[in-house]
Each structure stands twice: as structure tokens, then as C-alpha cells.
Image (cartoon, rainbow, N blue to C red):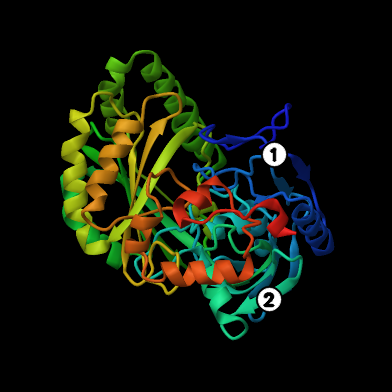
Amino acid sequence: MKTAAGTWRNWAGSATAVPARWCRPASVAQISAEVKAAAAGGLTVRALGSGHSFTDTAACPGGVVLDLSAWTGLASCDAATGIVTVRSGTTVRELNRLLDATGLAMANLGDIDVQTIAGALSTGTHGTGATLGGLATQITAMELVLADGSVVSCSASERPELFAAARVGLGALGVVTTVTLRCVPAFTLAADERPMPLDEVLATFGTMAAENDFCEFYWFPYGRKALVKRNNRVPSSDRPMPAWRRLWEYEVMENAAFGAMCRTGRRFPGLIPRLNAVSSSVLSARSYTDVSHRVFVTPRRVRFVESEYAVPRESLPDVLSELRSAVPRLPFPVMFPVEVRVAAADDIWLSTAYGRDSAYIAIHQYQGLPYQEYFDVFESVVASASGRPHWGKMHSLTAPRLRELYPKFDDFLAVRSAHDPGGLFVNPYLERVLGVSASPPGDRQ
């Protein structure tokens, strides 16, 4: 988001930058022209999404930011085949609405819908489902503006190496202008959400994940229960959650009441374990059916910082056991729950699930509370399981370690170098995670 002073700030307030210039192109030609102008002026370029990454992946200090909020909507849609091309500045929320109107849906989604589709894809956003991949596995083609201002398309058959890299491209290869997705006919989910003893959940989660289309759970670090969410495809039904219940559950309990508890914990940290245990004890069961995106997505109005790592699925019990033992020893208590999801292996070079069935563990802390020691402990726990960090969430890894975790890391760097030899799209985040740097301004012209 842009502040009154022209500073860029992300949603969580964990990253800021002051660009030299803001632009709001509304066509591919305008995006290309802005890229060429930035190169001619010796400035770097980054495309902005909605700022929901917790890292500084979109930051462009001293460079040109491309606000793509005027470049939205469907470029084409074939309801018969499910092939849809969407402009990169479209938010996931708006895409869901547009798809719903045509009788289509994304095969899987995360639980946040405020990101732009390009931002969500470029950072490896995922949902949950033992047999389903992250959002980027639904891509069939992409169009990008490269560092020289040229416009190129890529797919599995056209520039396949660029396609393998760009599906989770971190904004390092060019400005994504359109994404072509393979969607599915709109479907209904039966949602079953209920508290269970944490020990039982940890012992049976592998089975639950295998037996349900979509399965995940949350647990409060000082509580004895976890909230298990199981969503399964069913024939169309007219049993959506009543409006009053949706308001009560999501707006009153999960946002207003929980937000008040978080503010209390921030003011009186000694109360956090007790408040956390109360949150765990009042978890309630709910079952309903609704269109898929209304089940997948949950409104998040209480702000927080987050770190998330993907580990091989078989290592999940050991990782959670270590984390569960470590949290009570932290010098500062944790207010927010831990989230656990799963995804199938894929072949996308910088996907956190590249080559392995994965489990995702996401930790959070309420905005304004100390988090660094918690996140450091978490990183030490997942390191022994070769954990790969979510590109849009907070982590401390640098290129040498990431090279060890990603078999195609150097292949990605080679494609990046070939398409952006002068580092036009490089920013401090990419310098850290890819080990690359921008060339002197004169070399980028």
C-alpha cells in the first residue's frame, strides 16, 4: 500500500520502502513503456500486488513501482474447457467472483483472497489437499514483459524453461501481465470444522489428510485442543451457513473478540498463555455447505506477522513435536495459533513442494508483540527436516542455503540471468535469496 508520503508499506507493516516513482499502467503497452523508461533512467522496477507478503519481496527502494490495480479482469474465458486468461493485477477475490459468474472455479485456494493473482502465484501461495498442488500448478501459460520491454509468452511447449521458472518467479524474470489458468466447473464443499484433542490430531492427521479432499488444522500453543477443518466436494446444496452465523463466527468471534484478546495480551503479556488456552477451549463445531471459494476463504482483520515452512510430509510429526516442546520455553509468549496444511509434489523449480509431498507449518505472532526469538526457534526446528520457506513469509535464509534446498536453483538463476542480465528487476530481497545484484545503471540501458 502507498502512504500519504509516497512510502510503500506491506499489510503487516513488516516491510517498507521509498520508491523514486509510482506508475499505474492500464495496458501491456504502458507496462512495456514504463519498463523501458526505467531501464533508460538507470532505475530498477518492481510490480506491486496488494502487499500481503510478509517479506520485502515487492519493495523497490529508489526504483519504479508498477501499481497494477488498473490492469484487471478476464482477458478471455472458455467455460467449456475451463481455460481462463486473467490480467495480473486482478485480486483473487475478484477472480473468484468472475469465475463464479461463468460457472467455473479455481481447483484449490488458500484462505486469503486479497492478493493479486500474479503476486499469489509468484510467491508460491498454496491451499491444502494431499493430492493437490499449490496455485501455480493450475497455470497453463503466462505472458511477461521482459527487461528490454519485449512481450513474450511461455508455456510447457513454448519457452518451457522460462515457464518452469516463471510460475513461481518472485518477480525476478519480468513483469507478469497475464496468467492462463486451467479452472474446473464450479463446485460445492461440505465444511466440517470441529475441535479435537491435540494429541489425537497429531496421531491421526496423516489419515485425515488422505481421507478428505481438503484438510488442515490450527492449534493454540498453550491449549489442549486443535481446530480441524475438513472440506469435501458434494453435490450442490442449499445449506450455506446462515448470514447471522457467518457474522457471529467470523466477524465477531474470529476477528472482533480475538482482536480484543490480542490487544489485551499485547498490553499484559503475562496473560497470553491463559488467553491462548481460553481461545482453545471455546472452539466450536460448525458444519455447512457453500460454493468452494466461500468455504476456502476466511476474512482476516487481526493483523499479524507470519513465517511458514514446507517440510517433507513424513517429517511432520517430529517437527511438530519439537515445536510443541520449544514454545513453552520461549522468553515471550505466543498469542496466535499454528496452522498445518498439506500439498502434493510438483515440478515447478522454486515451488516449496518441488519434488516432494509436503506439509506446511505456519507460525504467527500478533502485530506489535515480540516474534524474532520464536521465529528463530522455528527455523532451527525445520532446518533439520530440510524445510523450505514460503517466499512471501518471513524467513532468514540466503542463497547458499536455498541452493541446497532447491535442486533447480541454479537452473532458475541461469534463466533469470538470460532474461534480465542487468538486474532491472532485482531488489534487496532478491539479492538475499538469489544471491544476485543489479548492474550499474549504465549497464541496464
Name the residue beneath numbered marker 2: 153
Query: Which of the marked residues, 1 or 2, is nearer the chain's N terminus?
Result: 1
Q: Mark 1 against mark 2, which lies toward the viewer?
A: 1
Residue 411 horizontal/vertical position (percent): 46, 72
Q: Is residue 440 left or right of residue 57?
A: right
Residue 172 horizontal/vertical position (percent): 58, 59
221 versus 197 height, above or below: above
**How many neighbours does mark 2 have within 10 angstroms: few (below 14), some (14-19), or many (20 or more)?**
some
Instruction: Please tell me which residue is depicted at 48% across the width and 59% down the height of the picture.
Output: 124
**How many neighbours does mark 1 have within 10 angstroms: few (below 14), some (14-19), or many (20 or more)?**
many
Instruction: Please tell me which residue is depicted at 38% across the width and 37% down the height of the picture.
Output: 364
Q: Which amino acid lies under the numbered mark 1 shown in the image of this protein?
A: Pro
Q: Nearer the viewer, residue 60 or 318?
A: 60
Instruction: Please tell me which residue is depicted at 51% across the width and 51% down the height of the picture.
Output: 431
Residue 217 horizontal/vertical position (percent): 32, 49
Q: Quadrant of residue 63?
A: top right
Q: Is residue 15 left or right of residue 100?
A: left
Give the SS element for disc 1.
loop
Q: Which disc, if any, is residue 19?
A: 1
Q: Nearer the viewer, residue 298 or 45?
A: 45
Q: Which disc, if any, is residue 161?
A: none
